[in-house]
Amino acid sequence: MMEQHTLKKLEYDKILKKLEQHAATELGIEKARKLKPGVELEKVELELRESAQGMELLLLSGPIPFGGIQNIGESLQKAEKGQVLELEQISRVVQTLYGFKKIKGYFAKYKDEGWSFPRLEAYEEKIEDFSGLENRINKIIDNYGEIRDDASPRLNSIRREQKILNQRIREKMDSYLQNSRLDKVIQDPVVTIRGDRLVLPVRADKKSLLPGIIHDRSASGQTVFVEPQPVVEMNNMLGTLQRDEEAEIYRILKEITSEIAWKSNGIKKSLEAAAQLDFIMSKAGLGREFNCSEPKLNKAGPINLKAARHPLLPPAEVVPIDVSLGDSFNTLVITGPNTGGKTVSLKTVGLICLMGQSGLLIPAEKESAIGVFAGIFADIGDEQSIEQSLSTFSSHLTQIVRLLKNAGPGDLVLLDEVGAGTDPEEGAALAMSLLQHLHNRGILTVATTHYTELKAFAYTSDGIENAAVEFDVETLSPTFRLLVGVPGRSNALAIARRLGLSEEIIEQARSYIGEHRSSVDGMISRIEKEEYEVLERKEALQREKEDLEEELERIKKERTELAEKHRQMVSDFSQRAQEIVEEIKAEGSKLLKEIRKHSGPRGDRMANEFNLAIKAQQDRIRELTVVGRKSSSQREPLQVKPGQKVKIASLNQEGVVLEEKQDRVNIQAGVMRVWVDKKDLLPVVEEAAAPRSTQRYKQSKAQSIRPSLDLRGMRWEEGREKTDKYLDDAYLAGLKKVEIIHGKGTGALRQGIHELLEGHHHVETYRRGEEGEGGDGVTIVNLKA
């Protein structure tokens, strides 16, 4: 368990306050309030995975609806003990059951989208379906939390009698007000209430004229409030009905309470699962607020934070820092000016580690890594105590003594202004000894300091590294950037010169610093220059790497798109080839029938020739289909010659071969000339030439066929047969447009002809004739090419 002192110094409680704001239920808020950092690697990993899945779901589908979920634990315990729940408690139970249903509905919806969040689904599956109990309660309690009249037949009967009796009482009281003989008896013509009883305001000196029970008197004593005697009896009856109503309501509530008690175990498990989901989604909401990511975890180091941000600083002001610790060194010494960001850097490291160990996503870039430490110890800020008469140095030292007693390997130590508050020489010596001690014990340590001696100590010690918060001398302000590997310099003299202090005073001050200090500053200056050059080269290489990765991603995307385009092209090619095969079969079959019908033995010979031509065309299309299915890497190089028509597969473009050089071919494709690989070429399907006998048959048809067919005077059956044969002959003859003359008559022949044309395989379009073409007596037919 982490020390409370550390949690306080790193302001962990403020993170929890922000976490509570993202919880939707009382139970979720309670879990957020009790959150503590974990120390078991596997458990922390699991909690971080849940938070990451929650944030992913939040971004994809919005928040889970937790409306209605309430903390009904005490009510369930009461029901289990046999105590009857009050109406308000049962209302809260049914609202919670409805909340369960909404949660399960939300998960069912996103599952339909094909998304998967196994860690969250594990909790959702623990929420049971209580629709039966929910419906049972809703039949008893209305939307306002009141018992319905029809909750039971007896209650319905009682309330009906109450309404009737109340109406009778109201009518009776109104009759007194309307009785003119009582005008001087009744003080004001109104019905009022005293002690749940309807009464009339009566003049005190006339009360004997209206027998009844006096329930109250006015302050002046001039008015008494009388319940007339006839009404007293009716009110007594009403009181009896009210007691009956209360008894029936109690019976109903007792019955419902028993049903709730019967289901209480499942309700409690479902409530815990819903609370855990709310808790996870509150962590997800916090992660979204801080733009967090899921860190990589390891056992007690190393720490490698990229663009880490302190979550409690305004986003517009915070400067991201990169921090590494635990690989080549386990102690980091941060130096720099006051208000330069040393303490913020220290707190950023500590607070991010606490957040990660609490299962919270961290405000740093992806690929950041943190350790799961057994303990995190911090000595930060002014620890002086007036009550204990401790100075700043003494209070810091007291804290460090306690820290050294409890910290060990597997822990993280954070020291702010180590060795400060006493003589600089002794303080620096004590700080170096302390850091060396922690380093030798294998404890990861981050410390801030002003002492120049610690910079040289870190530079010359193995496993201890310098870091500096950057300071801009030109603007006299810190940049808040943390530079690991660069020792910080004192900028006092540079700032003095920038502010206009005379050069004479500055040089005199420099002489007081001493040769050793000057040599140290010179060393730091050289190191700083070298480190800046390394950092600049590193940033340049990082930018180049990012550009290359972006280019690689673009190339991968283009290759994927080209592969998909090729797949679609092959699919379309294959489909069209199959359609052509089927069309050839259909047309050939009809043509062969005509040839055999009209040509005898000679027609049989022509038919055989035509069959051979069709088969050759079918084989050619199948061959091209197989070739098209192969990718360019799988296809054999196409053998070509100048002037040959080919198709460039990758461009889906036809062209003519100009020249070839080994495996490369120069193609003229429209206005474009391009060199392509032979494997990227496909042969062009040329239209097969019909046999000469077929050509002669077509020529004879073209010479004998007329552009019109006259059907006038024929019956429909005869006209259909002649029209069908005529269309075949006209198609073979190569006619594009013909006229069918059917006359006007009754319109039956025209209608039949139109029905035939509607689905005919040779017909492209048809229409009725226009004026000058024969009008309704003629149909103009456009044949397919």
Image: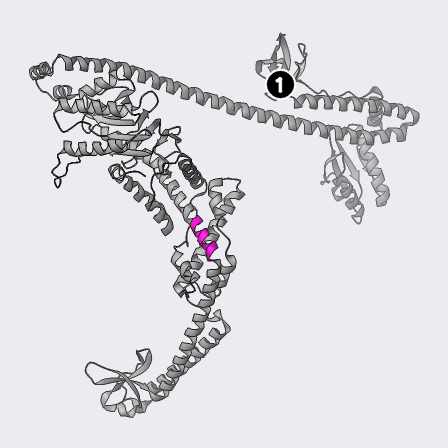
Q: Position of residue 562 (x, y in %)?
A: 56, 24
Mark 1 lies on a secondary structure that is loop
Q: Give the quarter of the image for residue 431.
A: top left
- The N terminus: image quadrant: top left
**Vertical position of residue 157 compared to residue 87: above or below:** below
Q: Which residues are magenta?
A: 264-273
**Vertical position of residue 563 compared to residue 117: above or below:** above
Residue at the far top: name it.
661
Q: Which one is in front, 386 or 125? A: 386
Q: Give the quarter of the image for residue 382.
A: top left
**Residue at 35% across, 26% down:** 302
**Does residue 316 show up?**
no
Q: Is residue 577 left or right of residue 728?
A: left
**Residue at 19% across, 13% down:** 522
**Residue at 35% across, 85% down:** 232
Q: Is residue 90 left or right of residue 459?
A: right
Provide the residue designation for mark 1. 632
Q: Which one is in front, 85 or 319? A: 85
Residue at the far front: name it.
405
**Residue at 51% across, 54% down:** 129
Q: Position of residue 79 (x, y in %)?
A: 43, 62
| Magenta span includes 265 | yes
**Vertical position of residue 230 compared to residue 69: above or below:** below
